[in-house]
Image (cartoon, helix red, strand yellow):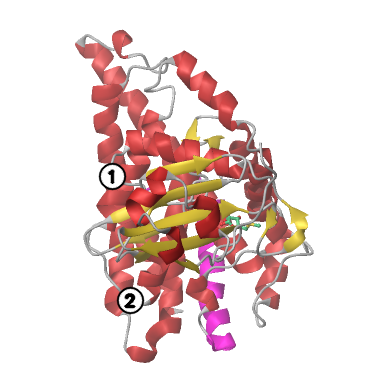
């Protein structure tokens, strides 16, 4: 096994130029390839490689956190988990992830489909683009991947093997455990926030109910090994055009609670909602705000409809065994059980969404929805609303019953 070496734009054609799967898609003459490093994420190198025959993406993990530097080492094996998660997601919801052409475990390199003319969903939402398909595509994606990776659908031996396989993604879980559930609620060294938030930050860090809820959610995250999660499903992990949606970057994949992916995803739409007033330089964003609330509702509704269909048609695992629900009375019991499962996902999803909103504003890893608002006072005003919303949904998660309740709350806060 050759020692790890980070790729550069100049070494890439030499190092990958003999791979048949890449030559076939880029061109037979590596010296004619053009290579651009385009990674803007927190962790990895990402290159677009173009040639006479086409283009591919080359993603390489670095042995440290790119956002922080070499002082924060991070194992290369996250690339292995990303590769295995992408394969499973492609089976569970075909067409929703990029195709993989080549994987080199030792060099932590994944070569995959270049999605074009796709852009990152977060950027599209910042620009005010209303994408008609994402609510349905993402709702189906979470239903299919979460259901089909669990004991509801999988043969028990395979599920336990996957649980063991992904259990080694310890360091990435550790990032989430600290950055999402703990750091926002005390003065952690890597935290930062927009000037002007001091009062609400002090309030949140003294908020006993919020801190208890954050720790409850952390407990669930760490202990409820329910399904194979994407693990980092935010709007920066989705690429879109008007008629195509793809989910990328599942390097945080592990067995955790279904509600985690749902909550992370929806939280990022609410952050987009509260950031819209900071992006009104080119016109009002009322229609965009309405679109975002509708999309949240569509994600949730699609999720429940598809999860219900899978429950009826594909429940072959060891949980709520279909064979125990065959006569009429048992069918009602099956519906009751399904209702309980969806209800728990809803309640827990709100808790995960609340802490995600807090950590993106108070912790290390912020998001562009707010960061691209140049006017600090305006940014702080947007972030304050998001912080309040996050606190409300986390602490009151057992008392909130529908997306409509949440839309009303969001609209009230937005008008404050
Ligand atoms: C140190 S990594 C910070 C964040 O970037 C990733 O995208 C995850 O969201 C992680 O929490
Ligand atoms: Mg990522």
Q: Work out whether 163 lies above or below 5.
A: above
Q: Is residue 387 magenta?
A: yes
- Magenta part, dominant SS: helix
Q: CA distance from mark 2 to mark 1?
A: 26 Å
**Residue 370, image x and y in percent?**
52, 75
Mark 2 or mark 1: which comes first in sequence?
1
Q: Residues within 10 Å of mark 1 (few under 14, many from 20)?
A: some
Is residue 226 in sight in this rendering?
yes
Q: Picture quarter containing residue 279? A: bottom left
Residue for point 45% across, 72% down: 274
Tell me: 47 left or right of 219: left
- Along the viewing direction, whichever of 186 and 66 lies nearer the viewer: 66
**Helix or strand or loop: what does disc 1 sit on?**
loop
Q: Is residue 228 above or below residue 300?
A: above
Task: Please tell me the numbered disc located at residue 128.
Answer: 2
Position in image of residue 172 (x %, y %): 64, 45
Say if 409 sits above or below 380 in the image: above
Q: Nearer the viewer, mark 2 or mark 1?
A: 1
* Relative to 295, residue 38 above or below: below
Q: Which residues make up the magenta segment? A: 374-403
């Amino acid at each position: 096994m050759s020692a790890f070496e980070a790729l550069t734009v100049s070494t890439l054609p030499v190092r990958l130029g003999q791979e048949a799967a890449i030559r076939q898609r880029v061109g037979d003459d590596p010296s004619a390839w053009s290579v651009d490093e385009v990674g803007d994420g927190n962790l990895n190198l990402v290159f677009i490689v173009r040639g006479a025959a086409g283009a591919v993406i080359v993603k390489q993990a670095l042995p440290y956190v790119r956002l922080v530097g070499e002082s924060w080492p991070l194992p290369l094996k996250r690339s292995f988990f990303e590769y295995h998660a992408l394969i499973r997601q492609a089976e569970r919801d075909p067409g929703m992830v990029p195709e993989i052409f080549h994987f080199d475990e030792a060099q932590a390199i994944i070569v995959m489909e270049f999605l074009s003319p796709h852009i990152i969903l977060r950027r599209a939402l910042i620009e005010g683009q209303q994408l008609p398909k994402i609510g349905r595509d993402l709702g189906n994606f979470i239903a299919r991947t979460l259901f089909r990776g669990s004991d509801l659908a999988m043969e028990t031996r395979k599920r336990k093997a996957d649980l063991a396989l992904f259990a080694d993604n310890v360091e990435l879980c550790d990032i989430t455990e600290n950055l999402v559930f703990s750091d926002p609620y005390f003065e952690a060294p890597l935290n930062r926030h927009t000037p002007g938030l001091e009062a609400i930050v002090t309030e949140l860090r003294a908020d006993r109910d919020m801190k208890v809820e954050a720790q409850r959610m952390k407990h669930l995250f760490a202990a409820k090994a329910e399904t194979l999660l994407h693990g980092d499903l935010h709007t920066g992990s989705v690429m879109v055009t008007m008629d195509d949606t793809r989910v990328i970057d599942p390097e945080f994949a592990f067995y955790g609670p279904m509600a985690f992916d749902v909550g992370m995803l929806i939280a990022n739409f609410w952050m987009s909602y509260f950031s819209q007033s900071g992006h009104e330089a080119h016109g009002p964003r009322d229609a965009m705000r309405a679109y975002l609330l509708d999309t949240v509702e569509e994600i949730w509704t699609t999720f429940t409809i598809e999860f219900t269909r899978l429950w009826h048609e594909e429940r072959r695992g060891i949980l709520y065994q279909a064979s125990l629900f065959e006569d009429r009375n048992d069918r009602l019991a099956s519906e009751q059980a399904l209702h309980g499962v969806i209800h728990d996902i809803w309640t827990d999803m709100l808790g995960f969404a609340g802490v995600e909103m807090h950590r993106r504003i108070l912790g290390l890893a912020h998001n562009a929805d707010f960061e691209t608002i140049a006017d600090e006072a305006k940014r702080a005003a947007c972030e304050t609303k998001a912080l309040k919303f996050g606190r409300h949904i986390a602490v009151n998660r057992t008392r909130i019953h529908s997306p409509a309740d949440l839309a009303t709350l969001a609209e009230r806060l937005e008008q404050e």
